[in-house]
Image (cartoon, rainbow, N blue to C red):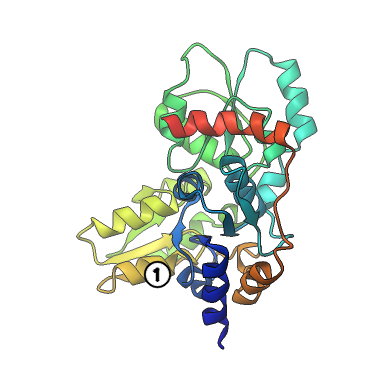
């Protein structure tokens, strides 16, 4: 039996659901029940009510699935698939800031650990950061963490002032304005879509700064036939599948998330066979971390 058939067999036996982020490898995306960005997968994790969820992504995402579906067994196929940006917001440092600024609203990008989510007031994703920030009292001071680029880009768009945590996504922060100009010169008719985790000078050159889910929707509804994609290149698989008549060009050098690419079919199979890579979180921590996530989802 081939590996895909074996995964399907074990998934059916366990009544499991496989969630995959747009950045994992195409063959892993192809065996998933749902593929999407952080917001879409957060919503699915809450909706599916499956006894077993296999989360093909990185740790903070699987933690979020566990927080939203505490009765489910959540499996992360690769235990050390982490997020460097999430690790830049240390829980002790965030707790110290919270104690020193008791009147400040803490907004955490979903790319944070469960321990940090338990310390903040509300979460957001790159797809809904605008909406979350608009929902806050205008007279309150705000700290946005951990991604300074998403914070800066959103604050500029909304004409807001807020404190920014000094974190960033190494993959998106690596994209430079000169990379964009070079690729745009090669494809002058193409629209440039970038992720809002990119640096502000890169976002300023783009036709739109969108979450990966936003990119999928934008391309589907656009009359344009060529697109330069400024985010992790795993998204090109979904874009090409959904739009075979359109051309997509990644920014060079390729933007690769090493942690996302750790998730392979072999690892998914091993997770289903052994059920050994469970996400385990204390109930009290999950209860506290769930509140800011649910405040976000309520919007």
| Visible residue check, residue 55 | yes
Q: Quarter of the image containing the N terminus?
A: bottom right
Using residue 46 as the reference point, say whether residue 70 is left or right of it. Answer: right
Image point (63%, 38%), residue name: 146
What residue is disc 1 on? 249
Q: Position of residue 255 (x, y in %)?
A: 55, 64
On the question of residue 253 being in view, the answer is no
Of all residues, the one furthest to the bottom in this rendering is 1
The foreground one among 96 and 12 is 12
Residue 40: x %, y % from top left: 44, 49
Q: Residues within 10 Å of mark 1 (few under 14, many from 20)?
A: some
Q: Which residue does the image show at 73% across and 48% down from the upper left?
A: 280
Apparent side of residue 271 relative to residue 243 in the rendered image (left or right): right
Q: Is 185 or 216 nearer to us in this picture?
A: 216
Of the pair 14 and 67, the residue shown nearer to us: 14
- The part of the image, by quadrant, that contains residue 225 is bottom left
Figure label count: 1
Q: Is residue 144 above or below residue 170?
A: above
Where the C terminus falls, by quadrant? top left
User: 15 above or below 84?
Assistant: below
State the residue lying farthest toward the left: 223
Residue 63 vertical position relative to residue 274 in the rendered view, above or below:
above
Q: Where residue 55 sits: x, y (%)?
A: 58, 58
Q: Quadrant of residue 222?
A: bottom left
Is 240 positioned to the left or the right of 50 in the image?
Answer: left
Q: Residue at x 72, y 46 (%)?
A: 87
Outermost residue toward the front in this view? 13
Q: Secondary structure at mark 1?
A: strand
């Amino acid at each position: 039996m081939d590996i895909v058939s074996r995964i399907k067999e074990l998934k059916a036996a366990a009544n499991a659901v496989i969630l995959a982020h747009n950045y994992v490898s195409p063959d892993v995306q192809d065996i998933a029940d749902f593929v999407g960005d952080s917001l879409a997968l957060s919503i699915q994790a809450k909706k599916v009510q499956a006894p077993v969820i296999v989360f093909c992504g990185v740790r903070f995402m699987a933690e979020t699935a566990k927080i939203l579906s505490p009765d489910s067994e959540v499996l992360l196929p690769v235990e050390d698939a982490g997020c460097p940006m999430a690790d830049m917001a240390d829980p002790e440092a965030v707790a110290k800031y919270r104690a020193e600024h008791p009147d400040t609203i803490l907004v955490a990008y979903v790319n944070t650990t469960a321990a940090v989510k338990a310390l903040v007031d509300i979460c957001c994703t790159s797809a809904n950061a605008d909406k979350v920030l608009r929902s806050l009292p205008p007279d309150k001071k705000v700290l946005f963490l951990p991604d300074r680029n998403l914070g800066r880009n959103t604050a500029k768009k909304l004409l807001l002032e807020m404190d920014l945590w000094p974190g960033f996504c190494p993959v998106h922060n690596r994209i430079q304005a000169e990379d964009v100009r070079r690729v745009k010169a090669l494809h002058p008719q193409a629209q440039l879509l970038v992720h809002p985790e990119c640096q502000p000078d890169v976002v300023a050159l783009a036709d739109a700064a969108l979450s990966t889910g936003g990119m999928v929707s934008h391309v589907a509804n656009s009359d344009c036939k060529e697109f330069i994609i400024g985010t992790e290149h795993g998204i090109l698989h979904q874009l090409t599948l959904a739009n075979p008549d359109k051309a997509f060009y990644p920014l060079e050098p390729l933007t690769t998330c090493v942690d996302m690419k750790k998730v392979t079919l072999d690892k998914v199979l091993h997770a289903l066979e052994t059920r050994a890579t469970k996400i385990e979180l204390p109930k009290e921590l999950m209860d506290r971390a769930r509140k800011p996530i649910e405040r976000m989802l309520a919007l």
